[in-house]
Amino acid sequence: QEEDQLFVIYKYFSSSSGLGIRGNSYSVIDGAWVGHESTVATSLQFGYEDGIWVPDNTIRYSLSGEDVTFISEEFIDVYPGPADNVGFFGSFDRRSSSPNYWSDEMLLEAFNALLDNINPAAEEEQKYVLTFVIYNGATTNETKSVIKLGGEWVYQE
């Protein structure tokens, strides 16, 4: 009968793996018994480095409100104006004329603290592409790529 289901278990011999037990679920579809098929969608990224293709372990990460609060609190004594400003507005001031300006070097310090907090066990050569909210006369997003080398996060070009 349509949509009836049966689970079949059987012994199976393979010259490479020997005797084993296998099983599968079968259902009646359009009057015929059909074995269950499962498909798992996966993807693998590659990067081109030094003339060869290598697996790319890059993690794409967008800073959350909690991340911005962490940075604000972590750097309030180091960069009082910029840290207070980012904590209040939720965006990094990228106008070089502003007293609350976050330079690339300051951002890298903040990213080091943040990534060491959210992923303290990150392996060497782990890569992140970080997206964060900035203010440069308008509110928009900026993206920076970092990689862990020698235990520190550095910009990756």
Image (cartoon, rainbow, N blue to C red):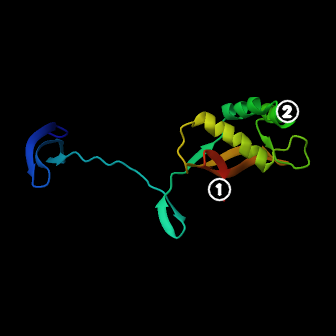
Q: Which residue is mark 2?
A: 80
| Front residue of 89 and 16 | 16
Query: Which residue is pictured at 68% across the width and 51% down the height?
Result: 144
Q: Where in the figure is residue 115, as x and y percent of width and height?
A: 63, 39
Disc 1 crowd rating (10 Å Cα; few below 14, some 14-19, many 20+) is few
Q: State the residue lying farthest toward the front.
A: 150
Q: Is residue 56 left or right of residue 77?
A: left
Q: Is residue 111 left or right of residue 6?
A: right
Q: Which picture quadrant has residue 102?
A: top right
Q: Amino acid at mark 2?
A: Pro
Above or below, comparing residue 68 to residue 94 in the picture: above
Disc 1 secondary structure class: loop
Mark 2 or mark 1: which comes first in sequence? 2
Q: Quadrant of the N terminus?
A: top left
Q: Position of residue 43 (x, y in %)?
A: 43, 53
Secondary element at image label 2: helix
Q: Nearer the viewer, residue 107 or 27?
A: 107
Count of marks, rendered view: 2
Q: Position of residue 3 (x, y in %)?
A: 20, 39
Quadrant for residue 5, please give it. Answer: top left
Residue at (73% x, 34% y) in the render: 71
CB contact under 8 Å: marks 2 and 1: no
Outermost residue toward the bottom in this view:
51
User: CA gap, disc 2 to disc 1?
Assistant: 28 Å
**In the image, residue 15 lies at what x, y percent?**
10, 55
Q: Which labelled disc corresponds to residue 156?
A: 1
Position of 150 compared to 86: left or right? left
Specify few, some or many for label 2: CA neighbours under 10 Å numbering under 14, 14-19, or 20 or more: few
Q: Quadrant of the C terminus?
A: bottom right
Residue type at mark 1: give it.
Answer: Gln
Q: Is residue 89 left or right of residue 149?
A: right
* Dot label at residue 107: none
